[in-house]
Amino acid sequence: MNTGHIVSTFSAAALAFAAGLAFNTTASAAGDQFAKAAHNYDTYCVQCHGINRNGRGINSTNMSVQPRDHSDAKGMADIPDNELFDVIKNGGLAANKSVLMPVWGNVFDEGEIKEMVAYLRYVCKCGSAK
Amino acid sequence: MMKLKSLTTISLSLMFAAPLAMAGNGADILKSQCISCHATVKPANLGMEHIWERKGPDLYYAGSKFNQPWLVKWLQSPTRIRPGGEFYTKHVKASGDKEDVIDASTLQDHVKLSKEDAEVAAEALMALTAPDGLLEKGAYKGEKVSPTMGAMFFNKLRGCAACHSAKPGTGGLSGAELYTAAERLQPDYVYSFIKNPQKIDPRVWMPALNLSEPDLQRLTGYILQLNATEGK
């Protein structure tokens, strides 16, 4: 599974690079399956969650509650998919989390949110809590 | 077409030995100085691709967004309004295990105009009023907001400070600084943008938060009361 990911990551990155389409290494490295979600992440989520998806975005410096580190397999594995979906759609308050996580349900449609949840699983290399 | 026109302008200037400092007309200044980075006509395809491609904020509704005196002043001595640039994700870089940083080498300074050019450009921009229905006119009631209460909503209860600064050196870096908002922006625009940024600038990186009417009044009022020295 991991090897497969690595191989597809490399070939996708190489293809994107060869085609001169590598507008962002992180997005292109995610491969075709997650290209749209990764592009959405780069557009909206990076401001707080960071280029490396580690919760260290430019806005995180002055925050009272630190953004979630999406690369943290253990922390992310504790959050079920439906909670990730709710928090993205309705904001942190909807799940008793920080208000600093805003409502994205007026930007993303439900399909995009589902893709984002799947992409977050790819980023954290972890499964969903039951 | 534009090239031909500017060539004509140049040759005419040479022929009549016009003084170099002479201000152009507003439309010419918009063409020569603004449209390479800003949309002064509503783009056919608004959305995420447009957000990534453009180099500066859209100006086709500038006349309903900005205050003219601020435009005249700012165009002569422009400062950066969004610390992360327009738009932020093109100007950030990772910094190991630490917070991402703004890569200042990728940020471009805004063009600077002479006083005469700034005045005519501002006048031309003010003529670019918003299409009907883009902004909610007169919805903001202009009631005074307690600065303490406003700051509590802005920082703690509604999370605006995650992306915006109400005072230099505080808050987030991906959104526009707001301690200059009152001088820069018209109240109807501030209210309408907070209520639904996606309606005005589709797929912009500020989400619509489903705020209640009292929240919209309070946040608009708070932001319009801010200034660089008193903001909290």
Image (tube, rainbow, N blue to C red):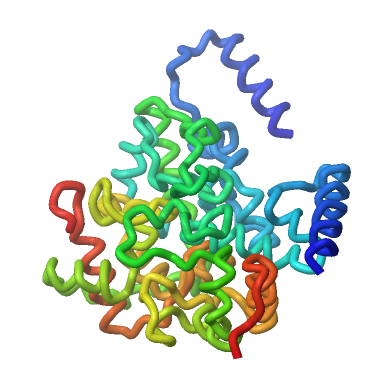
Instruction: Name the one closer to the observer, B88 or B11.
Output: B88
Q: Residue A130's x, y, as percent?
A: 60, 91
- Residue drawn at x 58%, y 88% is A82
Quadrant in which the N terminus of chain B is drawn: top right
Residue B222 appears left or right of B60: left
- Residue drawn at x 65%, y 56% is B50
The answer to whether residue B202 of the structure is visible from this angle is no
Q: Quadrant of residue A128?
A: bottom right
Q: Residue B181's x, y, as percent?
A: 30, 54
Residue occupying the far bottom of the picture: A130
Residue B139 sits above or below residue A125 on the image: below
The answer to whether residue B203 of the structure is visible from this angle is yes
Residue B64 sits above or below residue A109 on the image: above
Instruction: Name the one closer to the observer, B112 or B51.
Output: B51
Q: Residue B33's x, y, as percent?
A: 54, 33
- Residue drawn at x 40%, y 45% is B83
Residue A3 appears left or right of B32: right
Q: Residue B231's x, y, as percent?
A: 18, 55
